[in-house]
Amino acid sequence: QREAQRLKEQQHLHEPPKTTDGDSPVERAYRCFDSLARPSKKTMIACADKTDGLLLVDGDIDALPWNEKGDDLDYPKLHDMLAKEALRRKIKDQAMKLWIQAGRPDKQAF
């Protein structure tokens, strides 16, 4: 049973993750990648150059973990990157709450 669960988890990592609403370069680029029906890196760069509404900044597309051919993403790496972004956001939110609770002191007092 444990082996079956482990295999299921490994298989899940090779599937595209759900998009998030975060604002990191990886999250922004992945939302665009998903909304553009998972294009190649070359196609995505061309779309970004021609479309103002994608809300990408320089470097966002390169932040994605592309495979060697540039025609798809390395989904296990992407899962890991998105998990790290979620953790970073959680830590930042907790620090912000503590800062507000402390009366928003300056850096030296906090």
Image: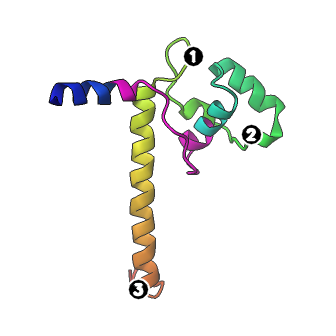
Q: Quadrant of the N terminus?
A: top left
Which residue is painted at 47% across and 81% down in the image?
A: 100
Q: Nearer the viewer, residue 33 or 48?
A: 33
Q: Is disc 2 surrounded by few (<14), some (14 to 19) or many (20+) residues within 10 Å?
A: some
**Image coloring type:** rainbow
Q: Earlier in the sequence, mark 2 or mark 1?
A: 2
> How far is mark 1 from mark 3, CA to CA?
47 Å
Q: Secondary structure at mark 2?
A: helix
Give me the disc on residue 83. none
**As drawn, is 60 to the left or to the right of 47?**
left
Quadrant in which residue 76 is drawn: top left
> How far is mark 2 from mark 1, CA to CA?
20 Å
Residue named by callout 1: 70
Residue named by callout 3: 102
Q: Is disc 3 surrounded by few (<14), some (14 to 19) or many (20+) residues within 10 Å?
A: few
Q: Earlier in the sequence, mark 2 or mark 3?
A: 2
Asked if the residue at tag 3 contacts the one at tag 2, i.e. Cβ–Cβ closer than 8 Å, the answer is no
Q: Secondary structure at mark 1?
A: loop
Image: 22 above or below 106: above
The residue at the far bottom in this view is 103
**As drawn, is 9 to the left or to the right of 89?**
left
Q: Nearer the viewer, mark 2 or mark 3?
A: 2
Q: Is disc 1 surrounded by few (<14), some (14 to 19) or many (20+) residues within 10 Å?
A: some
The residue at the far front in this view is 1
Q: Is residue 38 visible?
A: yes
Residue named by callout 2: 54
**As drawn, is 62 to the left or to the right of 37?**
left
Highlighted range, magenta: 11-29
**Residue 12 highlighted magenta (yes or no):** yes
